[in-house]
Amino acid sequence: MADLVAPCPPAALFAWVEDLGRYPQWLDIVPRAEAVEAQEGDPGPAWSVDLRGRLGPFARSKRLRMVRTVHEPMDRVRFERLEHDGRQHAGWVLSAEVAAVDGGSRLSMHLHYGGGLGGPLVERLLTDEITQSKPRLLALVEEGT
């Protein structure tokens, strides 16, 4: 879990987390996120997302198809991995909640990886990446871009 308090209204902060296509602008582990056509059975819009991470000398990348499964404007959003290739895949769930606080808003993000290969380690790495991206996200929110 990673939290961020920003001196802006919740709507300004929520705009940066409700669309995965905006994540590459502020989150280093997401170098690419492109909208793709939703398919039958998708509960919301879909994106093809590249994740890239480094742990010591090891670098790893992964391409996922993520679908927005919850969208409560200005409050909460959730994205889940949903592939349509007939194979079993490890679960990936990214959730974000935005709430009004004194002087602005608070963003709480949680990323869960359901795979067996170093699950807690991967989650910790991703949470650290989200935490390191806070200044970039704050700058973008302040610019109003």
Image: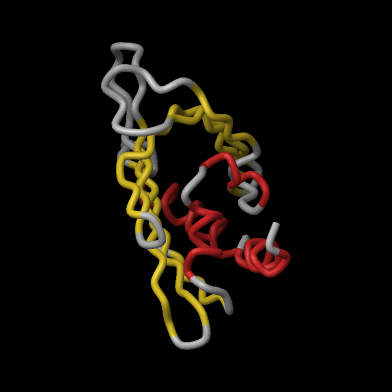
**Quadrant that contains the N terminus:** bottom left
Vertical comparison of 19 with 41: above or below: below
Residue at the (58%, 34%) spot, across then down: 33
* x then y, percent, for residue 76: 35, 57
* x then y, percent, for residue 51: 55, 37
**Quadrant that contains the C terminus:** bottom right
* x then y, percent, for residue 2: 45, 65
Residue at the (30%, 17%) spot, across then down: 40
| Displayed quadrant of residue 24 | top right
Relative depth, front residue between 144 and 1: 144
Vertical comparison of 73 with 49: above or below: below
Residue at the (38%, 55%) spot, across then down: 73
Query: Residue farthest to the bottom?
Result: 102
Number of labels in the image equals 0
**37 left or right of 57?**
left
**130 left or right of 3?**
right
